Amino acid sequence: MIRKGLPVSKVSLRRPGRPLQTGPRPVIKSIIVYTKDQKPRNEYPKRIVSPPYPAACCTDANRERIGKIHEELGRNYYYKRCRVCGHTVKYYFNVQSDLDSPKFRKYYEWKKSVFH
């Protein structure tokens, strides 16, 4: 809860369970260039030119995965691009939730039966 008139410190705004960052923020690299001046295009893995804002067409059903899985600062991601307008984002995902999927469990059971 933030009270009027009281200063808000960075400590009070940080997420619970995460240590306070005391150094400079890490530089996060991206191959995505957000611009209105150029036509959207996919030149993965060199760069991806994307509109700066998503449109109404940018739904999960219209987004396709671009390239391979990358790791950055201990988090996994890949690029997802709208098939209609070209808007692209870095899609961060939790490996554990993907491993719990029914598709993965089916594959794991098959693999156990074949190789063990």
Image: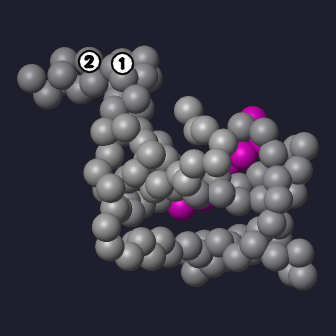
> Which residue lies at the image location 72% right of the left edge and 46% below the top edge?
63
Residue 60 place in picture, x, y as percent:
72, 37
Q: Is any atom of residue 69 visible in this view?
A: no
Q: How many marks?
A: 2
Q: Nearer the viewer, residue 78 or 53?
A: 53
Residue 100 place in picture, x, y as percent:
36, 23
C-alpha separation, residue under disc 1 versus residue under disc 2 = 5 Å
Left or right, residue 75 beside residue 109? right
Left or right, residue 16 beside residue 47? left
> Which residue lies at the image location 31% right of the left edge and 39% below the top edge?
17
Residue 1 place in picture, x, y as percent:
56, 32
Check disc 1 and give the amino acid type.
Lys
SS assignment at label 2: helix
Residue sitting at the far left: 116
Q: Quadrant of the C terminus?
A: top left
Assign the magenta stretch its main secondary structure.
strand
Q: Which residue is mark 2?
A: 109
Image-quadrant location for residue 79: bottom right
Give the residues in magenta. Answer: 61-67
Circle 1/circle 2 CB separation < 8 Å: yes
